[in-house]
Image (cartoon, rainbow, N blue to C red):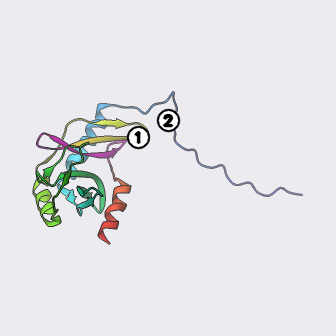
Amino acid sequence: MASPPQPPPPPPIRRFGPGAPPRIDMGLAQRAIETVRSALPYISIGPPIVRYGPAGDVHVDVPLMYHGFALDRVHFDPVAKTPSPKGRPARAWGVQVDINEVRSVMESLLRELRVIDAVEFREPELAWVVPLAWRFYLVAHIRVSYDGTELIPDYGLTEEVRRWLV
């Protein structure tokens, strides 16, 4: 009796083991920076995400959008009415947030964002991270593919933005 036909072997999975780290060079880093720089004019502001805490505190995040996908969130200080540095989500108490005012302020500040000529590499993701600055503050990180040619969205934030749009 003939045995049943065997399926073809599965395709290999590309992996970087302990002895084979990804090749890192300045050309790839420079390409990632240039990719973000060329995308910057097309980045827009998403709907401000306003959260009120149980103690009466308010926190505002403003997503940076690119072709319908969120790239990162900018923390917004509702008292100073400016972006807050990355890593410092501003909270305020006793402040009523006007979403239209937040959107207006952030849209005008969007033109002041600039790409920093430096990158970080995140090996688990095989991605470059290019910082964006507003004046003296780092306010966002844009992830770029290993080869430096594609922006990588923040899929969790993209889903959050879509929930706010409903």
The answer to whether the residues at label 2 and label 1 have Cβ atoms under 8 Å apart is yes
Residue kind at label 1, given as amino acid type: Leu
User: Majority secondary structure of the magenta segment?
Assistant: strand
Residue sitting at the far right: 1
Label 1 crowd (10 A; few <14 / some 14-19 / many >=20) = some
| Residue pointed to by mark 1 | 126
For the view shown, which residue lies furthest in the bottom direction?
Answer: 166
The residue labelled by disc 2 is 16
Decide: is 88 above or below 48: above
Residue drawn 15% across and 59% down?
95
At mark 1, the secondary structure is: loop
Graded by Cα atoms within 10 Å as few (under 14), some (14 to 19) or many (20 or more), the crowding at tag 2 reads few
Disc number placed over residue 24 in the picture, else none: none
Percent across and percent down for residue 115 are: 18, 43
Image quadrant where residue 158 sits: bottom left
For image coordinates 80% across by 58% down, the residue present is 4
Name which quarter of the figure residue 53 lies in: bottom left
Tell me which label, 2 or 1, sits earlier in the chain: 2
Quadrant of the rendered structure where residue 147 is?
A: top left
Q: How many marks?
A: 2
Asked if the magenta segment contains residue 143, the reply would be: yes
In the displayed structure, 139 sits above or below 55; it is above
Nearer-the-camera pick, 163 or 132: 163
Image quarter where the N terminus lies is: bottom right
- Amino acid type at mark 2: Phe
Q: Secondary structure at mark 2?
A: loop
Question: Which span of residues is magenta-colored?
Answer: 133-151
For residue 124, side relative to residue 154 (left or right):
right
Seen at 30% across and 67% down, the residue is 164
From this view, report whether residue 37 is shown above or below residue 123.
below
